[in-house]
Amino acid sequence: MSSIDLSQPLKFAYWVPNVSGGLVVSTIEQRTGWDFEYNKKLARIAEDAGFEYALSQTRYAASYGADKQHEATSFSLALLAATERLKVIAAVHPGMWHPGVLAKFIITADHISNGRAAVNIVSGWLKSEFTGFGLDWLDHDERYVRTEEFIRILRGLWTEQEYSQAGNYYNINNFTLNPPPVHVPGRAHPEIFFGGNSTAAQATAGRVADWYFSNGKDLDGFKENIAGVQAAAALAGRTPRFGLNGFVIARDSEKEARETLREIVAKAHRPAVEGFRDAVQEAGASTADKKGMWADSTFEDLIQYNDGFRTQLIGTPEQIAERIVAYKKIGVNLMLTCYLHFQEEVQAFGTDILPLVRELEADAAAKAGVDFTAPPTITSKAGV
Ligand SMILES: Cc1cc2nc3c(=O)[nH]c(=O)nc-3n(C[C@H](O)[C@H](O)[C@H](O)COP(=O)(O)O)c2cc1C
Protein backbone atom coordinates (compact mmCIF):
# COMPACT_ATOMS: atom_id res chain seq x y z
CA MET A 1 0.00 0.00 0.00
CA SER A 2 1.18 3.50 -0.78
CA SER A 3 2.48 5.72 2.01
CA ILE A 4 1.11 8.84 0.28
CA ASP A 5 -1.46 10.29 2.65
CA LEU A 6 -2.41 13.90 1.98
CA SER A 7 -4.84 13.94 4.92
CA GLN A 8 -2.08 13.57 7.50
CA PRO A 9 0.36 16.36 8.35
CA LEU A 10 4.00 15.63 7.70
CA LYS A 11 6.02 14.86 10.79
CA PHE A 12 9.37 16.46 11.54
CA ALA A 13 12.45 15.19 13.32
CA TYR A 14 15.92 16.56 13.94
CA TRP A 15 19.22 14.75 14.45
CA VAL A 16 20.40 14.94 18.03
CA PRO A 17 23.97 16.29 17.91
CA ASN A 18 25.26 13.87 20.54
CA VAL A 19 28.59 13.55 18.72
CA SER A 20 31.11 16.37 18.39
CA GLY A 21 31.83 18.34 15.25
CA GLY A 22 28.29 19.12 14.03
CA LEU A 23 26.54 17.39 11.16
CA VAL A 24 28.91 18.43 8.39
CA VAL A 25 32.57 17.46 8.24
CA SER A 26 33.77 20.98 7.49
CA THR A 27 35.67 23.72 9.26
CA ILE A 28 32.90 26.23 8.52
CA GLU A 29 31.54 27.76 11.72
CA GLN A 30 28.92 25.46 13.29
CA ARG A 31 27.20 26.90 16.34
CA THR A 32 26.17 23.42 17.45
CA GLY A 33 27.16 21.86 20.75
CA TRP A 34 27.25 18.14 21.49
CA ASP A 35 27.02 18.36 25.30
CA PHE A 36 23.91 17.62 27.29
CA GLU A 37 23.05 21.20 28.30
CA TYR A 38 23.07 22.31 24.65
CA ASN A 39 20.94 19.34 23.71
CA LYS A 40 18.46 19.78 26.52
CA LYS A 41 17.79 23.35 25.40
CA LEU A 42 17.61 22.24 21.77
CA ALA A 43 15.07 19.52 22.58
CA ARG A 44 12.82 22.02 24.33
CA ILE A 45 13.13 24.49 21.45
CA ALA A 46 12.30 21.69 19.00
CA GLU A 47 9.17 20.51 20.73
CA ASP A 48 7.91 24.09 20.99
CA ALA A 49 8.74 24.64 17.32
CA GLY A 50 6.53 21.74 16.19
CA PHE A 51 9.03 18.88 15.94
CA GLU A 52 7.55 15.54 16.95
CA TYR A 53 10.78 13.47 17.03
CA ALA A 54 14.49 13.68 17.80
CA LEU A 55 16.90 11.01 16.52
CA SER A 56 20.11 10.25 18.39
CA GLN A 57 23.24 8.79 16.82
CA THR A 58 25.03 5.71 18.08
CA ARG A 59 28.80 5.95 17.84
CA TYR A 60 31.39 4.44 20.14
CA ALA A 61 34.61 5.59 18.50
CA ALA A 62 35.96 8.61 16.67
CA SER A 63 34.80 8.43 13.10
CA TYR A 64 35.86 11.11 10.68
CA GLY A 65 34.47 14.21 12.32
CA ALA A 66 32.80 12.80 15.44
CA ASP A 67 35.81 12.74 17.75
CA LYS A 68 33.78 12.64 20.94
CA GLN A 69 30.44 10.95 21.45
CA HIS A 70 27.74 10.50 24.06
CA GLU A 71 26.07 7.10 24.23
CA ALA A 72 22.71 7.11 22.44
CA THR A 73 20.28 5.27 24.75
CA SER A 74 21.27 7.06 27.96
CA PHE A 75 21.35 10.42 26.16
CA SER A 76 17.94 9.79 24.62
CA LEU A 77 16.47 8.85 27.98
CA ALA A 78 17.80 12.05 29.54
CA LEU A 79 16.23 14.07 26.70
CA LEU A 80 12.92 12.31 27.26
CA ALA A 81 13.08 13.22 30.93
CA ALA A 82 13.83 16.86 30.03
CA THR A 83 10.89 17.28 27.62
CA GLU A 84 7.13 16.85 27.62
CA ARG A 85 5.99 15.96 24.12
CA LEU A 86 9.06 15.12 22.06
CA LYS A 87 9.50 11.46 21.09
CA VAL A 88 13.15 10.52 21.22
CA ILE A 89 14.42 7.77 18.95
CA ALA A 90 17.49 6.02 20.35
CA ALA A 91 19.81 4.51 17.75
CA VAL A 92 21.02 0.99 18.56
CA HIS A 93 23.13 -1.66 16.85
CA PRO A 94 22.07 -5.31 16.98
CA GLY A 95 25.34 -7.05 17.71
CA MET A 96 26.15 -4.52 20.44
CA TRP A 97 22.99 -5.29 22.45
CA HIS A 98 21.07 -8.33 23.53
CA PRO A 99 17.52 -7.66 22.27
CA GLY A 100 15.95 -8.67 25.60
CA VAL A 101 18.10 -6.17 27.50
CA LEU A 102 17.26 -3.42 25.03
CA ALA A 103 13.54 -4.30 25.10
CA LYS A 104 13.59 -3.93 28.88
CA PHE A 105 15.60 -0.68 28.76
CA ILE A 106 13.15 0.87 26.29
CA ILE A 107 10.12 -0.20 28.35
CA THR A 108 11.61 1.63 31.32
CA ALA A 109 12.32 4.69 29.17
CA ASP A 110 8.75 4.47 27.86
CA HIS A 111 7.36 4.55 31.40
CA ILE A 112 9.61 7.42 32.46
CA SER A 113 8.46 9.41 29.40
CA ASN A 114 4.81 8.36 29.37
CA GLY A 115 4.97 6.53 26.05
CA ARG A 116 7.52 8.60 24.06
CA ALA A 117 10.40 6.13 23.66
CA ALA A 118 11.34 4.80 20.23
CA VAL A 119 14.32 3.03 18.62
CA ASN A 120 16.24 3.30 15.36
CA ILE A 121 17.78 -0.06 14.53
CA VAL A 122 21.02 0.43 12.58
CA SER A 123 22.98 -2.52 11.28
CA GLY A 124 26.36 -0.78 11.30
CA TRP A 125 29.13 0.12 8.88
CA LEU A 126 32.07 1.08 11.12
CA LYS A 127 33.90 -2.22 11.27
CA SER A 128 36.54 -1.01 13.73
CA GLU A 129 33.90 -0.45 16.41
CA PHE A 130 32.90 -4.09 16.28
CA THR A 131 36.37 -5.57 15.96
CA GLY A 132 37.70 -3.15 18.60
CA PHE A 133 35.11 -4.45 21.04
CA GLY A 134 35.99 -8.03 20.07
CA LEU A 135 32.58 -8.55 18.46
CA ASP A 136 31.88 -10.43 15.24
CA TRP A 137 31.89 -8.28 12.11
CA LEU A 138 29.36 -10.08 9.93
CA ASP A 139 29.20 -9.85 6.15
CA HIS A 140 26.90 -7.12 4.89
CA ASP A 141 23.74 -9.11 4.17
CA GLU A 142 24.23 -11.35 7.20
CA ARG A 143 24.05 -8.23 9.37
CA TYR A 144 20.48 -7.84 8.18
CA VAL A 145 19.65 -11.46 9.05
CA ARG A 146 20.70 -10.63 12.61
CA THR A 147 18.81 -7.33 12.51
CA GLU A 148 15.61 -9.04 11.44
CA GLU A 149 15.84 -11.53 14.31
CA PHE A 150 16.56 -8.66 16.68
CA ILE A 151 13.53 -6.63 15.63
CA ARG A 152 11.20 -9.63 15.75
CA ILE A 153 12.32 -10.25 19.33
CA LEU A 154 11.78 -6.62 20.34
CA ARG A 155 8.27 -6.68 18.97
CA GLY A 156 7.56 -10.11 20.47
CA LEU A 157 8.75 -9.13 23.95
CA TRP A 158 6.84 -5.83 23.77
CA THR A 159 3.52 -7.36 22.75
CA GLU A 160 3.40 -10.95 24.00
CA GLN A 161 3.66 -12.92 27.22
CA GLU A 162 5.91 -15.98 27.45
CA TYR A 163 7.56 -15.11 24.17
CA SER A 164 9.87 -17.60 22.48
CA GLN A 165 12.00 -17.25 19.36
CA ALA A 166 14.79 -19.47 18.14
CA GLY A 167 17.28 -18.14 15.61
CA ASN A 168 20.87 -18.02 14.38
CA TYR A 169 21.86 -15.15 16.64
CA TYR A 170 19.50 -15.07 19.62
CA ASN A 171 17.25 -17.45 21.49
CA ILE A 172 14.41 -16.31 23.70
CA ASN A 173 12.71 -18.92 25.86
CA ASN A 174 9.21 -18.32 27.27
CA PHE A 175 10.08 -14.83 28.40
CA THR A 176 7.67 -12.18 29.73
CA LEU A 177 8.67 -8.56 30.35
CA ASN A 178 6.66 -6.84 33.05
CA PRO A 179 5.51 -4.14 32.94
CA PRO A 180 4.82 -4.04 29.21
CA PRO A 181 5.33 -0.73 27.35
CA VAL A 182 2.89 2.11 28.07
CA HIS A 183 -0.44 1.78 26.30
CA VAL A 184 -0.63 4.65 23.80
CA PRO A 185 -3.71 4.75 21.53
CA GLY A 186 -2.73 4.10 17.92
CA ARG A 187 0.66 2.65 18.87
CA ALA A 188 1.11 -1.10 19.31
CA HIS A 189 4.49 -0.71 21.05
CA PRO A 190 7.44 1.74 21.03
CA GLU A 191 7.99 2.63 17.38
CA ILE A 192 10.69 0.76 15.51
CA PHE A 193 12.61 2.89 13.01
CA PHE A 194 15.22 1.38 10.73
CA GLY A 195 18.13 3.03 8.90
CA GLY A 196 19.65 1.49 5.77
CA ASN A 197 19.59 1.81 2.01
CA SER A 198 20.90 -1.41 0.43
CA THR A 199 18.75 -4.08 -1.18
CA ALA A 200 19.04 -6.25 1.96
CA ALA A 201 18.19 -3.27 4.15
CA GLN A 202 15.10 -2.45 2.12
CA ALA A 203 13.84 -6.03 2.19
CA THR A 204 14.40 -6.33 5.94
CA ALA A 205 12.77 -3.00 6.67
CA GLY A 206 9.75 -3.94 4.57
CA ARG A 207 9.30 -7.14 6.54
CA VAL A 208 9.76 -5.84 10.09
CA ALA A 209 10.18 -2.06 10.54
CA ASP A 210 7.45 0.44 11.42
CA TRP A 211 9.44 3.25 9.81
CA TYR A 212 12.11 3.19 7.12
CA PHE A 213 14.71 5.95 7.24
CA SER A 214 16.52 6.88 4.06
CA ASN A 215 19.71 8.87 3.64
CA GLY A 216 19.29 12.06 1.64
CA LYS A 217 17.92 11.46 -1.89
CA ASP A 218 16.59 13.41 -4.84
CA LEU A 219 12.97 12.74 -5.77
CA ASP A 220 13.75 9.86 -8.14
CA GLY A 221 16.20 8.27 -5.72
CA PHE A 222 13.62 8.32 -2.98
CA LYS A 223 10.98 6.77 -5.27
CA GLU A 224 13.34 3.91 -6.05
CA ASN A 225 14.05 3.33 -2.37
CA ILE A 226 10.45 3.37 -1.31
CA ALA A 227 9.51 0.91 -4.08
CA GLY A 228 12.05 -1.62 -2.79
CA VAL A 229 10.78 -1.40 0.77
CA GLN A 230 7.15 -1.54 -0.30
CA ALA A 231 7.66 -4.63 -2.43
CA ALA A 232 8.90 -6.56 0.63
CA ALA A 233 6.27 -4.98 2.87
CA ALA A 234 3.45 -5.99 0.53
CA LEU A 235 4.55 -9.63 0.63
CA ALA A 236 4.53 -9.46 4.43
CA GLY A 237 1.17 -7.61 4.55
CA ARG A 238 2.73 -4.59 6.22
CA THR A 239 2.55 -0.81 5.62
CA PRO A 240 5.69 0.90 6.92
CA ARG A 241 6.02 4.66 6.89
CA PHE A 242 8.93 6.61 5.43
CA GLY A 243 11.41 9.15 6.73
CA LEU A 244 14.00 11.03 4.66
CA ASN A 245 17.11 12.91 5.77
CA GLY A 246 17.80 16.44 4.54
CA PHE A 247 20.28 19.17 5.47
CA VAL A 248 18.43 22.49 5.73
CA ILE A 249 20.05 25.73 4.60
CA ALA A 250 17.32 28.37 4.77
CA ARG A 251 18.40 31.93 4.01
CA ASP A 252 16.69 35.14 2.85
CA SER A 253 17.71 34.51 -0.73
CA GLU A 254 18.52 31.38 -2.68
CA LYS A 255 21.88 32.95 -3.57
CA GLU A 256 22.83 33.25 0.10
CA ALA A 257 21.79 29.66 0.80
CA ARG A 258 23.81 28.36 -2.16
CA GLU A 259 26.75 30.47 -1.01
CA THR A 260 26.59 28.79 2.41
CA LEU A 261 26.64 25.36 0.78
CA ARG A 262 29.64 26.41 -1.31
CA GLU A 263 31.43 27.54 1.85
CA ILE A 264 30.68 24.23 3.62
CA VAL A 265 32.14 22.35 0.65
CA ALA A 266 35.14 24.67 0.23
CA LYS A 267 35.99 24.21 3.91
CA ALA A 268 35.40 20.45 3.95
CA HIS A 269 37.80 18.57 6.18
CA ARG A 270 39.28 16.64 3.26
CA PRO A 271 41.24 13.90 5.10
CA ALA A 272 38.26 13.17 7.34
CA VAL A 273 35.82 12.96 4.43
CA GLU A 274 38.23 10.74 2.49
CA GLY A 275 38.71 8.48 5.53
CA PHE A 276 34.94 8.23 5.86
CA ARG A 277 34.63 7.38 2.17
CA ASP A 278 37.07 4.48 2.68
CA ALA A 279 35.31 3.19 5.81
CA VAL A 280 31.85 3.21 4.28
CA GLN A 281 32.94 0.76 1.61
CA GLU A 282 31.66 -1.77 4.19
CA ALA A 283 28.11 -0.53 3.52
CA GLY A 284 26.23 -0.68 0.20
CA ALA A 285 29.42 -0.80 -1.88
CA SER A 286 30.31 -4.20 -0.39
CA THR A 287 27.16 -5.92 -1.67
CA ALA A 288 26.70 -8.00 -4.83
CA ASP A 289 24.56 -5.38 -6.62
CA LYS A 290 26.67 -2.48 -5.22
CA LYS A 291 23.53 -0.66 -4.14
CA GLY A 292 23.01 0.96 -0.78
CA MET A 293 24.09 3.71 1.45
CA TRP A 294 26.98 5.83 0.18
CA ALA A 295 27.48 3.43 -2.76
CA ASP A 296 27.22 6.31 -5.25
CA SER A 297 27.89 9.29 -2.99
CA THR A 298 30.21 12.01 -4.27
CA PHE A 299 32.85 13.75 -2.15
CA GLU A 300 30.43 16.65 -1.69
CA ASP A 301 27.59 14.33 -0.61
CA LEU A 302 29.77 12.75 2.08
CA ILE A 303 30.52 16.06 3.77
CA GLN A 304 27.05 15.72 5.32
CA TYR A 305 27.57 12.15 6.34
CA ASN A 306 23.99 11.08 5.66
CA ASP A 307 23.88 12.52 2.12
CA GLY A 308 21.73 15.39 3.37
CA PHE A 309 22.57 17.85 0.55
CA ARG A 310 20.98 15.53 -1.99
CA THR A 311 17.51 16.29 -0.66
CA GLN A 312 18.09 19.94 -1.61
CA LEU A 313 16.38 21.67 1.28
CA ILE A 314 18.44 24.69 0.30
CA GLY A 315 17.04 28.13 -0.53
CA THR A 316 14.39 30.49 0.83
CA PRO A 317 11.79 29.24 3.34
CA GLU A 318 9.24 29.20 0.50
CA GLN A 319 11.47 27.08 -1.74
CA ILE A 320 12.22 24.67 1.08
CA ALA A 321 8.55 24.33 2.03
CA GLU A 322 7.67 23.56 -1.59
CA ARG A 323 10.42 20.98 -1.83
CA ILE A 324 9.29 19.30 1.39
CA VAL A 325 5.71 19.05 0.19
CA ALA A 326 6.94 17.64 -3.15
CA TYR A 327 8.49 14.80 -1.12
CA LYS A 328 5.23 14.29 0.78
CA LYS A 329 3.47 13.84 -2.54
CA ILE A 330 5.73 10.91 -3.39
CA GLY A 331 5.35 9.21 -0.02
CA VAL A 332 7.58 10.84 2.61
CA ASN A 333 5.77 10.83 5.97
CA LEU A 334 8.54 12.31 8.10
CA MET A 335 11.32 14.75 7.26
CA LEU A 336 14.47 14.23 9.30
CA THR A 337 16.49 17.45 9.36
CA CYS A 338 19.93 18.74 10.26
CA TYR A 339 21.50 22.19 10.31
CA LEU A 340 24.70 24.19 10.75
CA HIS A 341 23.46 25.99 13.87
CA PHE A 342 20.91 23.69 15.45
CA GLN A 343 19.27 25.80 18.16
CA GLU A 344 18.78 28.89 16.00
CA GLU A 345 17.80 27.03 12.87
CA VAL A 346 15.42 24.54 14.47
CA GLN A 347 13.59 27.47 15.97
CA ALA A 348 13.61 29.36 12.66
CA PHE A 349 12.31 26.23 10.93
CA GLY A 350 9.30 26.33 13.27
CA THR A 351 8.53 29.99 12.63
CA ASP A 352 9.53 30.47 8.98
CA ILE A 353 9.10 27.13 7.22
CA LEU A 354 6.59 24.99 9.07
CA PRO A 355 3.61 27.38 8.65
CA LEU A 356 4.32 27.47 4.89
CA VAL A 357 4.49 23.68 4.77
CA ARG A 358 1.13 23.44 6.53
CA GLU A 359 -0.45 25.87 4.03
CA LEU A 360 0.91 23.92 1.08
CA GLU A 361 -0.25 20.64 2.62
CA ALA A 362 -3.75 22.08 3.09
CA ASP A 363 -3.77 23.22 -0.58
CA ALA A 364 -2.62 19.81 -1.79
CA ALA A 365 -5.29 18.07 0.26
CA ALA A 366 -8.01 20.45 -0.96
CA LYS A 367 -7.00 19.86 -4.59
CA ALA A 368 -7.21 16.11 -3.99
CA GLY A 369 -10.57 16.49 -2.20
CA VAL A 370 -9.36 15.14 1.15
CA ASP A 371 -9.73 16.65 4.64
CA PHE A 372 -6.62 18.00 6.29
CA THR A 373 -6.25 19.41 9.78
CA ALA A 374 -3.04 21.31 10.32
CA PRO A 375 -1.45 21.04 13.75
CA PRO A 376 -0.77 24.39 15.45
CA THR A 377 2.43 26.17 14.42
CA ILE A 378 4.32 28.88 16.27
CA THR A 379 4.04 32.41 14.97
CA SER A 380 6.29 34.52 17.19
CA LYS A 381 10.05 34.46 17.16
CA ALA A 382 11.51 34.02 20.63
CA GLY A 383 15.25 34.64 20.97
CA VAL A 384 17.45 31.60 21.38
C1 LIG B 1 18.65 7.90 9.28
C2 LIG B 1 19.80 6.97 9.50
C3 LIG B 1 20.43 6.96 10.75
C4 LIG B 1 21.54 6.15 10.98
N1 LIG B 1 22.15 6.20 12.20
C5 LIG B 1 23.25 5.46 12.42
C6 LIG B 1 23.93 5.54 13.67
O1 LIG B 1 23.53 6.26 14.56
N2 LIG B 1 25.04 4.76 13.83
C7 LIG B 1 25.50 3.92 12.84
O2 LIG B 1 26.51 3.25 13.04
N3 LIG B 1 24.87 3.84 11.65
C8 LIG B 1 23.76 4.59 11.42
N4 LIG B 1 23.13 4.48 10.21
C9 LIG B 1 23.71 3.63 9.15
C10 LIG B 1 23.14 2.23 9.10
O3 LIG B 1 23.44 1.53 10.24
C11 LIG B 1 23.77 1.38 8.00
O4 LIG B 1 25.09 1.07 8.33
C12 LIG B 1 23.82 2.10 6.73
O5 LIG B 1 22.52 2.46 6.41
C13 LIG B 1 24.43 1.26 5.59
O6 LIG B 1 23.56 0.30 5.28
P1 LIG B 1 23.36 -0.27 3.82
O7 LIG B 1 24.70 -0.70 3.36
O8 LIG B 1 22.44 -1.41 4.09
O9 LIG B 1 22.75 0.77 2.98
C14 LIG B 1 22.00 5.28 9.96
C15 LIG B 1 21.34 5.27 8.73
C16 LIG B 1 20.27 6.09 8.49
C17 LIG B 1 19.61 6.07 7.15
Image (tube, grey):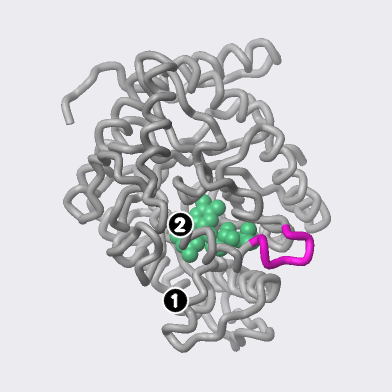
- Picture layout, residue 169 above or below residue 78: below
Residue 344 position in % (x across, y down) = 25, 32
| Residue 171 located left or right of residue 312 | right
Which residue bears the numbered disc 1? 129
Q: Residue at x 45, y 54 (%)?
A: 273
The residue carrying pointer 1 sits among few (fewer than 14), some (14 to 19) or many (20 or more) residues within 10 Å by Cα, namely some
Residue 17 position in % (x across, y down) = 32, 51
Which of the two labelled residues, at mark 1 and mark 2, occupies the earlier sequence position?
2
Q: For the image shown, how many numbered marks are present on the structure? A: 2
Which residue bears the numbered disc 2? 118
| Residue 124 located left or right of residue 104 | right
Residue type for callout 2: Ala
Q: Quadrant of the N terminus?
A: top right
Residue 212 position in % (x across, y down) = 61, 51
Find out if the beta carbon at label 1 lies less than 8 Å from the nearest ligand 1 atom: yes
Q: Which residues are magenta?
A: 284-290
> Image quadrant of residue 244?
top right
- Picture layout, residue 32 above or below residue 259: below
238 and 300: which is toward the camera: 300
9 and 169: which is toward the camera: 169
Instruction: Examine the rendering and report whether any part of residue 52 can be seen.
Output: no
Residue type for callout 1: Glu
Residue 168 position in % (x across, y down) = 68, 86
Q: Residue at x 46, y 15 (%)?
A: 318
Rounded to the nearest angstrom, the CA distance separating label 1 from label 2 is: 23 Å
> Image quadrant of residue 256?
top left
Task: Inspect the magenta stretch and tell me whether residue 95 lies in it.
Answer: no
Q: Which mark is residue 175?
A: none
Q: Residue at x 54, y 64 (%)?
A: 278
Q: Secondary structure at mark 2?
A: strand
Q: Which of the two marks, 1 or 2, is nearer to us in this view?
A: 1
Find out if the beta carbon at label 2 lies less than 8 Å from the nearest ligand 1 atom: no
